[in-house]
Amino acid sequence: MARSIADLRSQRVVILDGPDGYESHPPKQGNPQACSWHLALDAVGTIVSPSP
């Protein structure tokens, strides 16, 4: 998996994985309300600019 993530990042794909993004957990062990949507939306905002 680390190689896949490195390959994607080398192609300038934004990956929100790890301590500064999404940290995975075992199935059915997570808290959906704790999802860091603001990190995803901030990342989108840095790569997509609104059309005039």
Image (tube, rainbow, N blue to C red):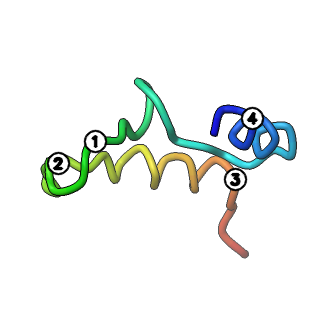
Amino acid, disc 4: Arg
Helix, strand or loop at disc 1?
A: loop
Q: Which residue is mark 4?
A: 3
Crowding at dot 2, Cα within 10 Å, few <14 / some 14-19 / many 20+, comes out as few
Residue located at (74% from left, 35% from top):
3
Foreground label between 3 and 4: 4
Residue at mark 1 to residue at mark 2: CA–CA distance: 6 Å
- Pointer 1 residue: 25
**Residue position for label 3:** 47
Task: Give the residue type that dot 3 points to.
Answer: Ile
Q: Nearer the viewer, residue 45 or 30?
A: 30
Image-quadrant location for residue 5: top right
Residue reaching furthest right? 11
Residues at marks 4 and 2 touching, judged by CB atoms closer than 8 Å: no
Image quarter (top left, top right, bottom left or bottom right) of the N terminus: top right
* Amino acid type for the residue under numbered disc 1: His
Label 3 vs 2, first from the N-terminus: 2
Q: Earlier in the sequence, mark 4 or mark 2?
A: 4
Judge depth for marks 1 and 3 and give the one in front.
1
Q: Quadrant of residue 4?
A: top right
